[in-house]
Image: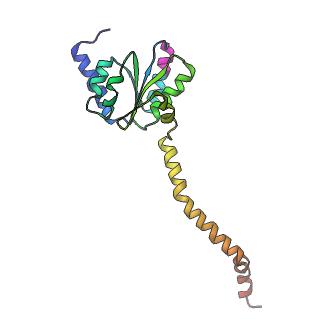
Amino acid sequence: MALNLSQKKEVVAELAGVAATAHSLVAAEYAGTTVEQMTAMRKKARESGVYLRVVKNTLASRAVAGTEFEVVKDALVGPLLYAFSTEEPGAAGRLIKEFAKGNDKLKAKIVSVEGKLLPAEHVEVLASLPTREQALAMLARVLAEPATMFARVVKAVADQQGGGEVAAETPAEAEPA
């Protein structure tokens, strides 16, 4: 179904708004993907904070103009599915990688992060980025490790000097007989 001019302007404005705030972009060839597969992918995309849309390349090119994804304009060729990560950088990469396993027709073609156009193989690297929760857990471990090591050292020194046994004997000596 062809879009009229006002509908095209709406699509470009919507896509430009998403591109202005997105962390990463993965564009994939989707020709041969079934309706059921696309429906499942759209559902998973909504759950994982990925904006997923199929639009004409000319509209996508206009939408990314003036954003950090402007570097992909020349690579927009053929029928493409656009996945913008809106919450965390690796979400779009994980989505495309996950669905490409079960569908050999779905192939990443463009990966863009922080204003850089990367080869399609970088979808693996993008997919391996930790989620926000995983990154916070790693940070918490890193911050807690020095305190844990200090406590171990203090305990080891106390055990080596017999501090644990002395502390246990002190209350018994304090009682008059």
Image coordinates of residue 4 in percent, x first then y, are 24, 12
**Front residue of 55 and 121:** 121
Above/below status of 156 relative to 135: below
Q: Find residue 71 and report its horizontal and vertical position in percent.
A: 33, 30
Q: Residue furthest left?
A: 6
Residue 164 located within the stretch drawn in magenta: no
Residue at the outermost right position: 177
Q: Is 39 one of the magenta-colored residues?
A: yes
Quarter of the figure with the C terminus:
bottom right
Above or below residue 13? Residue 142 is below
Instruction: Looking at the picture, tell me which residue is in the foreground, 93 or 119.
Output: 119
| Residue 66 percent across, percent down from the top left | 25, 32
* Residue sitting nearer the eye, 171 or 143: 143
The magenta-colored residue range is 34-40
**Vertical side of 93 occupied by 42: above or below:** above
Q: As rendered, which of 73 and 90 lies closer to the eye?
A: 73
Residue at 53%, 50% in the rendered image: 138
